[in-house]
Amino acid sequence: MIDICYATSEPPGVDEFIDVLERSTLAARRPVENRACLQGMLDHADLFVTARCDSKLVGIARSVTDFHYCCYLSDIAVDREYQSRGIGKQLIRETRSPLGPQCKLILLSAPEVADYYPKIGFTHHPRAWLLDGGAIF
Ligand SMILES: CC(C)(COP(=O)(O)OP(=O)(O)OC[C@H]1O[C@@H](n2cnc3c(N)ncnc32)[C@H](O)[C@@H]1OP(=O)(O)O)[C@@H](O)C(=O)NCCC(=O)NCCS
């Protein structure tokens, strides 16, 4: 049984963030080659939950939220070597903890993990829409 320490914390440094994204596979879907973007993601998000084994960052949840109505859980990532041990679920519980009772958690699933969210209570929303950065209308 491994001992994982969860913290609602300051953002990690950009190198540590990239490292855990890579160790989880989520790096393939995040702009890890663009440090300025990654730094902005760390500087301007509202809520970080980290999971550490000793001092090693093994999981992270990064959210943008008003804490009352909506919380966009943008990135949740668990190091491959630590997956399927309940860390993802606990990161989500800890993310919800400072949110008000009416606050909805919203996320976009990576295709590989689309079956994960219904398993842990998320419902699918058929009318979610995206506008890409720079899209003209
Ligand atoms: C998705 C992710 C965060 C889940 O974290 P985790 O710590 O592995 O998940 P948990 O251990 O809390 O899993 C809880 C349950 O979901 C199941 N599960 C885990 N990954 C799953 C997947 N990809 N598909 C379906 N079920 C999954 C577990 O088996 C477990 O089931 P159980 O409670 O019946 O045993 C993690 O697998 C990950 O980082 N994946 C790669 C990065 C990624 O795609 N992130 C999501 C971006 S939207």
Image (tube, rainbow, N blue to C red):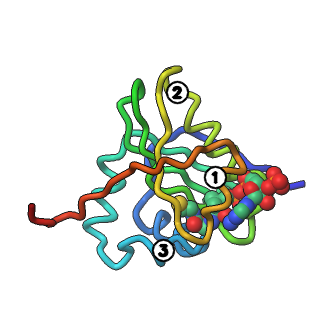
Q: Give the residue number, with chain letter if any, for mark 2.
A: 98
Whereabouts is ligand 1, in terms of quadrant? bottom right
- Quadrant that contains the C terminus: bottom left
Q: Give the residue number, with chain letter if any, for mark 3.
A: 27
Residue at 63% over, 52% down: 117
Determine the CA span between mark 3 and mark 1: 19 Å
Q: Which sits earlier in the primary sequence, circle 2 or circle 1?
A: 2
Q: Is residue 92 above or below residue 15?
A: above
User: Mark 1 near ligand 1 (CB under 8 Å)?
Assistant: no
Quadrant of res 5: top right
Quadrant of res 121: top right
| Foreground label between 2 and 1 | 1
Q: Which label belongs to residue 24?
A: none
Q: Along the line of sight, which residue is nearer the eye, 7 or 61?
A: 61
Q: Which sits earlier in the primary sequence, circle 3 or circle 1?
A: 3
Determine the CA span between mark 3 and mark 2: 27 Å
Residue at 56% over, 54% down: 60
Residue 78 visible in this rendered orientation of the protein: no
- Quadrant that contains the N terminus: bottom right
Circle 3 sits in a helix, a strand or a loop, which is it?
A: helix
Side (left or right) of 130 relative to 108: left
Q: Which label belongs to residue 117?
A: 1
